[in-house]
Amino acid sequence: MAGATLTIHAQQSDGVELVGFDSLAETSLFKGDVSTDGGKEIKTPHRGLALLVFPAGRSYPVIIGDTSFTLGIATPAAPPTFKDSGENDFFYRLLAGAESTPKQNYRFAKLMIRAKQLLESTHSVRSVVELTAKKTEIHDFVRTNYEDLKHSDMIRRLIAQYFMMHEYVQYHFEGRPATDIKKRYDAAVLGGVGSWLDILSPYLSKPEILNYCVSLYYDRSMVSLASLIMEKYRDYAFCASEQQKPMVFPGETKVTDISGQVQGTLADYNGNKVIAFVAKDCPVSMVVAVSKARELSDQKGTVPLIVAAVEKLSAQHLAMAKMVRGERMLFIDDGGWRESSLPEKIRLPLFVEIEEK
């Protein structure tokens, strides 16, 4: 594999992950243990910012360029040290607030600092006028620097903070009813989504952009607003697919509830059933599934919504049930159906209704 070699030396054996970025997507460049004796060499074609992530959640930025270098880890609680990487040394000095005049023009490190300062400047926004000005500043910054920013997590972070700013602002106007607050807030969010669809569509597909915007609200259990975004931009509220084919769920397919403990089989649930297909990397599918489960719960009927995750069932899938009142969401906990019936990719969201005859 072409590219630079990053050598990691650790004073204590610990698992780490090195995560790289490509615009809104992230990818694992390495995940595993680093021995204390020989270290670990990682060859990667990634150029830009990566995150060195420890199991407990602490992470540190690492700039990867064309030159190989060594990274030292004392403990997860301390920032890494660098050998043969002047740009990372310079970057960490700036992160610590120290003045630094490098011999070389470390343009990428300086851009990351500018992005960090822009993020920090958003916390003082309080009025609609300030919000509008700051949104324009973020738009211009991303437009101008996209080709470099896409190799870092900064596009993701800037968009996330862009939407968070809406919650800092007072939307009430004297003489207007309090109900206008939510309308103005929702309109500002929906307009923001439209702006990002326009700005990023020369580089990314609109469904990918929309999925990321939706995820920012779904991940905070703000399903109603996520649904509103999908309704406004329904033409892009999907994940790409291949040709569909019929999917079969035998009666002995195992089904579980939020506990993750196997409760029974599909045949144990008499009457009509709704199967909702979801994927962790397709937030719109999870939003639609939660919304449908809420709808079934409000109808006070006996029809359950059963989630079929296209990947192995995980805590992230089970957490969907916490967003639904009652016990109207169950989960298929049987990989056999994926092996026998699931295409390589399916268009999501997707529901299948099973009617008992």
Image (cartoon, helix red, strand yellow):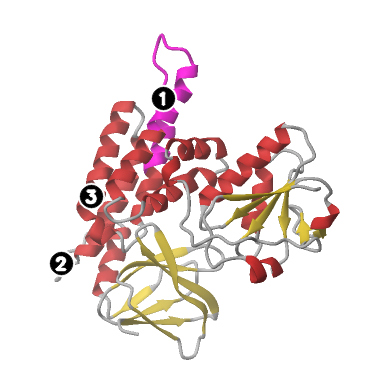
Q: CA distance from mark 3 to mark 2?
A: 22 Å
**Secondary structure category for the residue under label 2:** loop
Name the kind of residue labelled 1 in the image. Answer: Arg
- The residue nearer to you, when weighing 252 against 66, is 252
Quadrant showing the N terminus: bottom left
Taking the magenta stretch, the answer to whether it contains residue 209 is: no
* Residue at the (20%, 51%) spot, across then down: 144
Say which mark, if any, is on residue 236: none
Q: In the shown orientation, is residue 9 left or right of residue 272? A: left
Say which mark, if any, is on residue 105: 2
Does 174 sit above or below residue 309?
above
Residues at marks 3 and 2 touching, judged by CB atoms closer than 8 Å:
no
Q: How many marks can you see?
A: 3
Q: Position of residue 344 (x, y in %)?
A: 54, 68
Mark 1, Cα crowd under 10 Å, few <14 / some 14-19 / many 20+, is: some
Taking the magenta stretch, the answer to whether it contains residue 175 is: yes
Please name the residue that numbered disc 3 is placed on: 143
Please name the residue that numbered disc 1 is placed on: 184
Badge 3 or badge 2: first in the primary sequence: 2
Name the kind of residue labelled 3 in the image. Answer: Arg
* Residue at the (25%, 78%) spot, across then down: 66
